[in-house]
């Protein structure tokens, strides 16, 4: 069976949505008989760095190797057959030899592009329009590399095929229906309990969600917000209950205790937390970004408002609080929609067919 190596942009000991999708694929590929490696470099600038920089990287390597850690075992249940490699860089001589290599982020693609192997063995997994570290021009230039490109959403497929005239394959995300499910009946939940993901990145635009919830609080002072995220509590008001890096059981409890989920991102590659909330029976009020649109259909599976508009977002949250029939209907429809359209079986079938073509 073929050996596959995923190229990450760094150690993966902290949770991340993009990492999560990669590891889900890795687990399922080894279960199908593939041999899977995951490479975590301590640096993406090894060749360009000074002697002092290389010494720092060597120190970071041993710190990660023997103390801090570098794999995902502390937060994600990875199959033991998946092999992790901590390396100094993504240079070809530093990575394990494989049949297939998969670049998983825009900064890893140039490394794979330089590997002295056939283009048919190079794959580029695109989960977002990753322009937060490099320019738009640099991002788009990677879409023209001679690689087999695959994306997670229709909007990314449109960017690459219609705007850049490059071929790519849609490999839709899946969800674990055992990890995300309804454990508390939708109709019996406290409608004043709301959940949100907190993230400091400007793309997530949590300020809009916080402003919207302040507006809702003025009308319904009894609301309670269950917030979760990877960072420490950023100093949220006392009516927020914050959970840092909740495990899967705690996350499931949050998603089932809350009746409403609020998403306020300006842009998302996909928007995992919206789908997870829907699967757990939360009614969703979110912004109209392209990633959310894969699941959030206005008045059908969610209430959708313009980006950076806290007033309209607040109005939609209030509608869900005041209209029990609407809230229960959207929650039920959302759960059904995600279950029908985002299965790992469908995702893996497409991916394995793509990998087996090389």
Image (spheres, grey):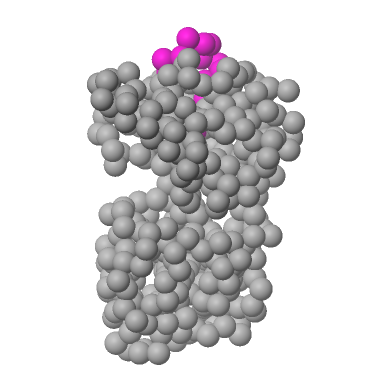
- Count of numbered marks: 0
Residue at 46% x, 44% y: name it: 68
Can residue 224 be seen?
A: yes
Where is residue 49, by image quadrant?
top left
Q: Where is residue 214 in the image (x, y as percent from the top left)?
A: 29, 79
Q: Is residue 337 above or below residue 172?
A: below
Q: Where is residue 187 in the image (x, y as percent from the top left)?
A: 61, 82
Q: In this view, does 94 lie to the left or right of 217?
A: right
Residue at 38% x, 77% y: name it: 240
- Bounds of the magenta span? 113-126
Q: Where is residue 212 in the image (x, y as percent from the top left)?
A: 31, 74
Where is residue 200, by image quadrant?
bottom left
Where is residue 224, by image quadrant?
bottom left
Q: Which quadrant is the N terminus positioned in?
A: top right
Can residue 153 be seen?
A: no
Q: Does the stretch in magenta take in 117?
A: yes
Q: Which of 78 and 129 is in front in this view?
A: 78
Q: Is residue 322 above or below residue 108?
A: below
Q: Which quadrant is the C terminus positioned in?
A: top right
Residue at 38% x, 59% y: name it: 231
Residue at 44% x, 64% y: name it: 244
Q: Position of residue 192 (x, y in %)?
A: 46, 84
Q: Which of 42 and 329 is in front in this view?
A: 42
Q: Does the stretch in magenta take in 280?
A: no
Q: Which of 219 and 251 is in front in this view?
A: 251
Q: In this view, does 49 lie to the left or right of 250?
A: left
């Amino acid at each position: 069976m073929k050996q596959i190596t995923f190229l990450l942009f760094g150690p993966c000991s902290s949770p991340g949505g993009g990492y999560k999708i990669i590891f889900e694929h890795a687990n399922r590929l080894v279960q199908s008989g593939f041999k899977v490696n995951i490479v975590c470099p301590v640096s993406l600038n090894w060749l360009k760095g000074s002697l002092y920089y290389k010494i720092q990287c060597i120190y970071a390597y041993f710190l990660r190797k023997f103390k801090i850690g570098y794999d995902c075992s502390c937060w994600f249940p990875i199959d033991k057959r998946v092999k992790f490699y901590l390396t100094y860089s993504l240079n070809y001589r530093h990575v394990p030899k494989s049949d297939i290599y998969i670049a998983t982020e825009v900064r890893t693609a140039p490394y794979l592009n330089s590997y002295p192997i056939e283009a048919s063995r190079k794959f580029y997994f695109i989960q977002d329009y990753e322009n937060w570290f490099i320019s738009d021009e640099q991002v788009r230039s990677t879409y023209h590399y001679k690689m087999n490109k695959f994306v997670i959403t229709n909007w990314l497929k449109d960017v690459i095929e219609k705007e850049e005239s490059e071929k790519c394959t849609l490999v839709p995300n899946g969800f674990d229906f055992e990890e995300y499910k309804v454990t508390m009946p939708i109709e019996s939940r406290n409608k004043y309990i709301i959940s949100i993901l907190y993230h400091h990145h400007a793309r997530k635009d949590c300020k809009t969600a916080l402003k919207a919830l302040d507006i809702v609080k003025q009308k319904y002072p009894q609301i309670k917000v269950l917030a979760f995220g990877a960072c420490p509590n950023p100093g949220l008001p006392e009516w927020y209950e914050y959970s840092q890096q909740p495990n899967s059981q705690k996350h499931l409890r949050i998603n089932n205790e809350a009746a409403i989920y609020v998403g306020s991102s300006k842009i998302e590659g996909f928007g995992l937390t919206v789908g997870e909330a829907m699967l757990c029976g939360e009614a969703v009020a979110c912004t109209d970004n392209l990633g959310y649109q894969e699941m959030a259909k206005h008045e059908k599976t969610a209430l959708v408002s313009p980006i950076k508009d806290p007033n309209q977002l607040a109005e939609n949250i209030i509608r869900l609080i005041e209209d029990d029939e609407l809230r229960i209907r959207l929650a039920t429809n959302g759960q059904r929609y995600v279950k029908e359209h985002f299965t790992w079986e469908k995702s893996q079938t497409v991916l394995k067919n793509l990998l087996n073509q090389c």
